[in-house]
Image (spheres, rainbow, N blue to C red):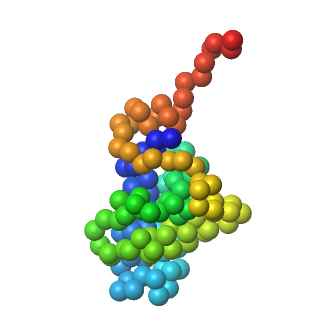
Amino acid sequence: MHMNRDLIQAYIRKLTIGVGSAASDPFADITLFDNDVHSMKMAAERAGDLEWLRLSLDALIANPRGRIGQFVEQGYPYSDDEMVTLLTYAYQKIWPDHKISDPGEEAALEFVEMSDETWQAIKNPPESDDLF
């Protein structure tokens, strides 16, 4: 399934260039990201994207190879392992009762650029009146 890369990038950006990332070693105390995690959650919740964000983070954590680096931007130079650590921390803070998928069991998401109209059609598919 195609996932809106820019949308997920905007949510992850709240972590990668947020307050927590300003520390000289952000991973010395990962709780520095707590406000950024909360901000990401609230933004996704307001937009009705929280479940899409969960599926995306889960997919990136379970299968980061060759995919997670596209979500690193300016600022702190996150390695792939650090991104997995950060996304895992955020995932567990937001969804403490959801288990992260084992590799190969995650949603088959392909992060691609798409228009807002295309994303809305995926997010809110039109209901069919044709029952047969």
Front-most of 111 and 115? 111
| Circle count | 0
- Residue 57 appears anywhere in the view: no
Quadrant occupied by the C terminus: top right
Q: Residue 1's x, y, as percent?
A: 50, 41
**Residue in the picture at 54% in, 47% down:** 108
Q: Residue furthest right?
A: 97
Front-most of 122 and 60? 60
On screen, residue 87 above or below 49: below
Residue 26's image quarter? bottom left
- Residue 31 appears anywhere in the view: yes
Q: Residue 2's x, y, as percent?
A: 46, 41
Residue 79's image quarter? bottom left
Q: Residue 111's x, y, as percent?
A: 42, 48
Q: Residue 120's x, y, as percent?
A: 46, 34
**Residue in the picture at 61% in, 68% down:** 92
**Residue in the picture at 35% in, 59% down:** 70
Q: Residue furthest front?
A: 104
Residue 76's image quarter? bottom left
Q: Residue furthest left?
A: 74
**Residue in the picture at 38% in, 45% down:** 112
